[in-house]
Amino acid sequence: MLHSHSRAFARACSVLAAILLVLLAMPASADLRSSPTWYDQNAVGSAPDWHYRVPVNVPAGATVNSTIKVDVDFNALLSTMGISGTFDVNSPRIVRPGGSLAVRQEFSDTIYNGATDASNNGRGEIRFILEDAGASVYQVYFDITQNGAKAANPQTPINGNFERGAIGTSQPAAWNAPTGASSLDAQVRPSETPSVTTNGTNAYPTPKTTDGTPRTGAFSYMIGSRGQNETGDNSRTITRTFTVPATNPGNFTVRWRVEGWDSTGYDTLTIRLNAGGTTINVVGPAYGNYTTAPHSPNMSNVTNAPQSAVQPGYRAYNYFDMTSTGAHTQGMSVAAQGEPWWTRTVSLASLAGQTVTLTIQSTHINQFRSWFHIDDVEWSIVNGTLGSPQGFGVVFLTPTAATAGITPLSISVQVDANPTAGSSPVTVDLVNPGGSVTRTVPLFNDGTHGDAVAGDAIWTNNGSVAADRMVLPGGALNGSWQLRAYARDASTSTVGARNGVIRGPGTGSAPETEANYWNIDEYLLGSGAIGVTKTSSVVSDPFSGTANPKRIPGATILYCVLITNTGAGTVTSIVLSDTINLPELYVAGSIRSGTTCANAVIVEDDNNIGGDESDPVGASFSASTVDGRTASIAAGATIALVYNITVQ
């Protein structure tokens, strides 16, 4: 019987297992960007696409409706990524953690570090209204003109600095249209020094060269009577609304400049906040405090008379609290005819969680011109901090395990953004174990070379054109050759790399590998190999039971089929078939699976349906055959399938 069993055992070892050539994907920083997914307002490949981003870290104390502010030097970020190009001032977009655009956002090209900055120098100020509570990470996407010029940002700006609006615009973006006397000024103004002449008896000096320089940036808003003499008793008003955070509301701050010849008894500026029956007088007669918050070019005296040698009053240009001799009467230190910017900050605690109306009003009584500039209106400011910039990514889609051994190789990659290099923007190198490139082929996104859809995110080369074919030499699947994909944009490298590759974390020159560059991906070509071992042991016999059982008729035998991946790469789609030869009989319901013979305890029923087929190893018994299957086995890993038979 032992001889008979040995013969049966030999036949029972007819285990079928394919030795499959596969690709081993090496994890790295290239691939497609995730956490979050790369922003695209339409399909990848459809303009516009963005090629770079930098995270803005919002601190934990920030609450919804806060104004987040951060300065960004985009040229410095490009330099960090080892590239250069012309920064596109229209390109910045602020994207929320979930991938949608922030509703209210802006980039001010002429403001940096709280001061006026030269235009088109690759840096400026980012602001947006926070829509996500607590610590969060927003992304600022940006680009260079060489990658395709972007349209102006369509999102609503905050525009407290009046940088959105052409010269002469009466209704700036995010503000309501001005109301009141149309004869009075209400418009966006640039930096200028106009000469102004006023009416009124004994006004001096007139004409006067006045200061129209914005506090920061390229523009401010002017309201009042500069362009012409006042035609009577009238006013001009501009308003807007904003929502105050419900917690940590912060402050409201406004900057203004007064200019002209009239006094507080006649021409005044009023700035106030209103919400839910609460009014905060920020600047104006109702607030008072002229010496720290002047709301007219001159203080009036008790009789609202003209200025004299002993008292302030109207007719002098910007004499504030001074007499005609230049003597201060209320302790102010501003110079005669001085034109400084003034600032007032108030707490928003009493307006927390409410929608506030901001009113700015210029009120006039006939004669002696006066006007006011408004700039840098802001509220609930929270400063964000920048992280490290990133470039768009690329990842291999094919070859796969099923196609790795097919010659020529069919290759496809997916990109986060459209590669914009002038020629062959997407290529794949074959790199030998010594690091030398032995073959380079282009990939296509024009509906040829196996490309399914032209102009999408997938670039392909299926080897159908001989001149563009990737053929692997003998030995390329030994685990030490690589495929390396490049998806290049139109930037210029500043670190000695090929143009269009974007340096990853770190600075300076570095080998062109996916570990060092954002838009390079690599696959290590490797092979898997299957080793199969079958063992048996006697579980019990009719006479001794489980105590020193023998292989005799009626004995129960446990078989274990152990499959090992002895290669360097993952093996996929493993199928085995083990035939039980008569007179041995399969013990119904005895199949178990695991990673070794000893721990094969997962119950597998005898059919090939049901929940047990979704565990790592699926198994069944039919017509004297035990079948098993598994999706993949990693290099060096094992799976085991055990079952019982009865010796006849």
Image: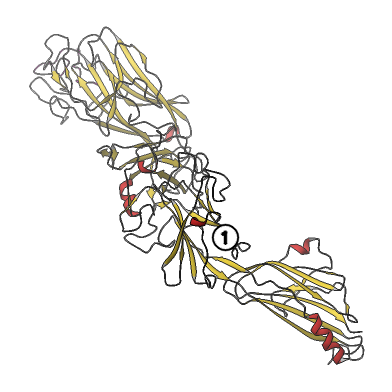
Identity, as a three-letter code, of the amino acid under mark 1: Pro
Residue 62: where, in percent of width, then height? 44, 44
Q: Would you say the magenta stretch is mainly helix, strand or loop?
A: loop
Farthest top residue in view: 232
* Residue sitting nearer the eye, 259 or 433: 433
How many other residues sit within 10 Å of disc 1, few (<14), some (14-19) or many (≥20)?
many
Foreground residue among 586 and 452: 452
Q: Which of 534 and 599 lies nearest the eye of the viewer?
A: 534
Is residue 550 among the parts visible in the rendering?
no
The stretch of residues the image draws in magenta is 296-314
Residue 343 visible somewhere in the drawing: yes
Q: What's the residue at 83%, 79% (across, down)?
A: 644
149 relative to 258, above or below: below
Q: Nearer the viewer, residue 241 or 123?
A: 123
Q: Quadrant of residue 541?
A: bottom right
Q: Position of residue 459 (x, y in %)?
A: 52, 50
Residue reaching furthest to the front = 466
Query: What element does badge 1 sit on?
Result: loop
Q: Considering only vertical position in the picture, is 581 above or below 83?
A: below
**Quarter containing the C terminus:** bottom right
Residue 98 in the image: state x and y as whole percent: 53, 45
Percent coordinates x, y for residue 223 in the rendering: 29, 20
Instruction: Identify the residue at image location x=53%, y=67%.
Output: 525
Left/right of residue 375 with respect to residue 30 in the rendered view:
left
For disc 1, the marked residue is 399
Quarter assignment of residue 365: top left
Residue 307 is one of the magenta-drawn residues = yes
